[in-house]
């Protein structure tokens, strides 16, 4: 009887390890199928933040987000002096922030020296704005209920 129990326990442990390995190692779904046939991109909506986006947001300060938003609103920025006039911060601080945003892949410096927001930065900023509007609506609803 003890022999059967140990055998079943070993089988359960082996199945658990196989299940864990399959779930951990198997590639994540990149596409989903639409009802009418064909494929639709999966997890590319602007509101669906993935883990890497969440890490990028957690590494950024509110001033970094404001700087990214200023670059987004302007389109392309020719010099740091233009940003200095908008943000009223020193050029050294702006250069550090621009370097940080560039390392995160949110902006790119062109060959002419201009700063442009990348598609990844645009998507991250739009999802952040959507989160802020949802949070404001929730706060308004809570205030109206009280």
Image (cartoon, rainbow, N blue to C red):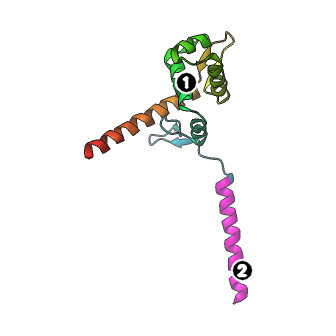
Above or below — where is 68 with respect to 140?
Answer: above
Q: Residue at horizontal 63%, vertical 12%?
A: 114
Q: Name the mark on residue 98.
A: none
The residue that disc 1 covers is 68
The residue that disc 2 covers is 7
Place of residue 22 in the rendered image (x, y in percent of width and height, measured from the top left): 67, 57
Q: Residue at horizontal 71%, vertical 69%?
A: 14
The residue mark sitting in front, 2 or 1, is: 1
Task: Tell me the element at label 1.
Answer: helix
Closer to us: 85 or 131 = 85
Above or below — where is 115 with respect to 124?
Answer: above
Q: Classify residue 46 as left or right of residue 13.
A: left
Task: Tell me the element at label 2.
Answer: helix
Place of residue 47 in the rendered image (x, y in percent of width and height, measured from the top left): 47, 37
- Specify the segment rendered in magenta: 1-24
Place of residue 29 in the rendered image (x, y in percent of width and height, measured from the top left): 59, 45
| Dominant secondary structure (helix, strand or loop) of the stretch shown in magenta | helix
Quarter occupied by the N terminus: bottom right
């Amino acid at each position: 009887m003890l022999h059967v129990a140990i055998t079943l326990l070993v089988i359960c442990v082996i199945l658990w390890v196989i299940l864990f390995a399959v779930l951990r190692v198997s590639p994540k779904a990149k596409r989903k199928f639409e009802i009418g046939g064909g494929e639709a991109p999966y997890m590319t909506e602007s509101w669906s933040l993935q883990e890497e986006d969440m890490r990028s947001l957690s590494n950024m300060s509110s001033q970094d987000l404001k700087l990214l938003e200023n670059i987004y609103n302007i389109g392309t920025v020719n010099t740091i002096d233009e940003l200095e006039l908008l943000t009223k911060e020193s050029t050294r601080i702006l250069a550090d922030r621009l370097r940080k945003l560039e390392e995160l892949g949110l902006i790119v410096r062109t060959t002419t020296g201009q700063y442009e927001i990348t598609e990844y930065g645009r998507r991250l900023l739009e999802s952040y704005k959507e989160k802020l509007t949802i949070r404001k609506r929730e706060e308004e609803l809570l205030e109206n209920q009280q």
